[in-house]
């Protein structure tokens, strides 16, 4: 870690290095009033990722997935989350990685993807930076069953949901994943705004 004019690192301790890295940082932060304040924070780093919403103009459906998420269960919620397909970059180009994730998770191969924006999803504790894409799919684009990679513990259900229904599912709480809500709202703005 590099010191700056507003931050002086004192030490760091690796707490876990299993699925991702959890590190505790002790540092001094220069406050607006000119005083230095010692702080301790933990940051979880599991890499950067990519996500995509595919829309079918013939059917008016979006392509979503449903899968088990342990952290959601631990928070007392329904752990079978409805989401947009996504994956970790693991050193790959975001668009290339998204194409392989789409085939792996949904069974659909698409020709064109549009980069929308990049977002820090939970900057208070997680280092992840997520690239967002949109694209079009057609039923003829199906090249496999999808369902995810068994060796990665994935057991994914593929869902074709009418866009209007997906938007209602946000309000009802049936869709409560942040990246999915952002992409659905972006699609709605395209679809329903003159």
Image (tube, grey):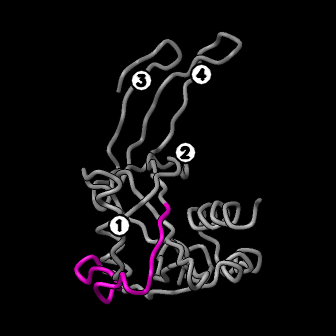
Q: CA distance from mark 4 to mark 2?
A: 20 Å
* Disc 1: which residue: 111
Please give the range of residues in magenta. Answer: 134-152
Q: Nearer the viewer, residue 123 or 110?
A: 110
Task: Confirm whether residue 73 shows in the render.
Answer: no
From the top left corner, tell me how far across and down residue 33 is, in percent: 71, 12
Q: CA distance from mark 3 to mark 2?
A: 19 Å
Q: Nearer the viewer, mark 1 or mark 2?
A: 1
Q: CA distance from mark 1 to mark 4?
A: 51 Å
Find out whether the residues at labels 3 and 1 contact each other: C-beta distance under 8 Å: no
* Disc 4: which residue: 37
Q: Nearer the viewer, residue 175 or 42?
A: 175
Residue 3 placement: quadrant: top left
Q: Residue at x 44, y 50 (%)?
A: 128
For marks 4 and 2, the one nearer the N-term is 4
Q: Which mark is residue 123?
A: 2
Q: What is the secondary structure assignment of the residue under circle 2?
A: loop
Asked if 180 appears above or below 125 in the picture, the reply is below
For marks 1 and 4, the one nearer the N-term is 4
Q: Quadrant of the C terminus?
A: bottom right
Task: Confirm whether residue 2 shows in the render.
Answer: yes
Q: What is the secondary structure assignment of the residue under circle 1?
A: loop
* Disc 3: which residue: 9
* The stretch drawn in magenta includes residue 129: no
Q: Nearer the viewer, mark 4 or mark 2?
A: 2
From the top left corner, tell me how far across and down residue 69 is, in percent: 47, 77
């Amino acid at each position: 870690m590099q010191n700056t004019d507003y931050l002086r690192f004192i030490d760091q301790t690796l707490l876990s290095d299993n699925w991702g890295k959890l590190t505790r940082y002790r540092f001094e932060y220069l406050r607006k009033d000119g005083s230095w304040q010692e702080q301790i924070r933990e940051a979880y780093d599991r890499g950067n990722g990519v996500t995509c919403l595919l829309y079918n103009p013939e059917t008016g459906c979006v392509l979503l997935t449903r899968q088990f998420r342990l952290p959601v269960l631990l928070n007392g919620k329904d752990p079978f989350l409805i989401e947009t397909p996504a994956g970790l970059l693991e050193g790959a180009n975001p668009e290339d990685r998204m194409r392989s994730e789409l085939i792996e998770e949904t069974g659909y191969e698409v020709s064109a993807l549009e980069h929308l924006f990049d977002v820090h999803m939970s900057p208070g504790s997680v280092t992840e930076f997520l690239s967002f894409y949109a694209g079009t799919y057609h039923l003829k684009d199906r090249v496999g069953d999808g369902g995810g990679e068994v060796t990665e513990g994935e057991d994914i259900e593929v869902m074709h949901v009418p866009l209007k229904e997906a938007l209602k599912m946000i309000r009802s709480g049936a869709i409560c994943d942040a990246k999915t809500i952002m992409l659905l709202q972006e699609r709605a703005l395209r679809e329903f705004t003159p």
